[in-house]
Image (spheres, rainbow, N blue to C red):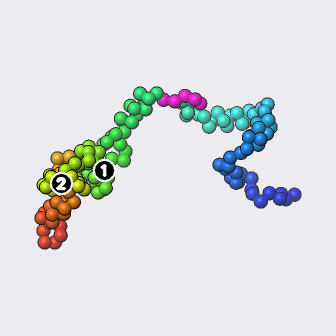
Amino acid sequence: MTSNNPFPKGHKINLGRKQSEETRRKISLGLMGRQLSAESRAKIGMAHLGNKWGVGHHPSEELKKRWSEQRLGNKSSSWKGDKVGYSQLHKWIRKYKGRPLWCSFCGSTMKIQWANINHDYKRDLDGWMALCISCHIKYDERERNGKGQFV
């Protein structure tokens, strides 16, 4: 016997679809009084193993904060140290030094950025200074040798 249903069993055609109140009521009435088999209860129990918080229980805010602090900075499994990329290093500098407010050379307050002093791009907060774009370009040009590389 073949089925007229174009979707195989387990197809997720209705996944995420909102159901009307009437449909939800009918489903609720259809499931009312249903008894789960021992095998089904065992499968549900196995699925919940390892869920130490249980349904409706959550870790305290103090515990969440302690977990977060255990993975900050160089304690993180994603920490790369000085092998960090250009953009992430600049984000790190902005995080700890803040947004630069004025240029260290000309005193301008327009379009200020953090410039690496010795161009080694390490996680050293003392190795950065605030420069406007114009002074940053001039500083970098002065620090370059004839091959376009930093001395």
Task: Answer with left or right where residue 59 lies relative to residue 18.
Answer: left
Q: Residues within 10 Å of mark 2 (few under 14, many from 20)?
A: some
Q: Quadrant of the C terminus?
A: bottom left
**Whether residue 73 is situated above or below residue 56 in the rendered picture:** below
Amino acid type of the residue that numbered disc 1 sits on in the rendered structure: Lys
In the drawing, what numbered circle is on residue 91? 1
Whole-percent x, y for residue 82 in the image: 26, 51
The stretch of residues the image draws in magenta is 55-59
Disc 2 versus disc 1: distance between alpha carbons? 22 Å
Task: Answer with left or right where residue 99 lies relative to residue 30.
Answer: left
Q: Can residue 117 be spotted in the picture?
A: yes
Tell which residue pokes out farthest to the right in this image.
Answer: 1
Residue that mark 2 sits on: 108
Q: Nearer the viewer, mark 2 or mark 1?
A: 2
Q: Residues within 10 Å of mark 1 (few under 14, many from 20)?
A: few
Residue 35 quadrant:
top right
Q: Are marks 2 and 1 in contact (CB under 8 Å)?
A: no
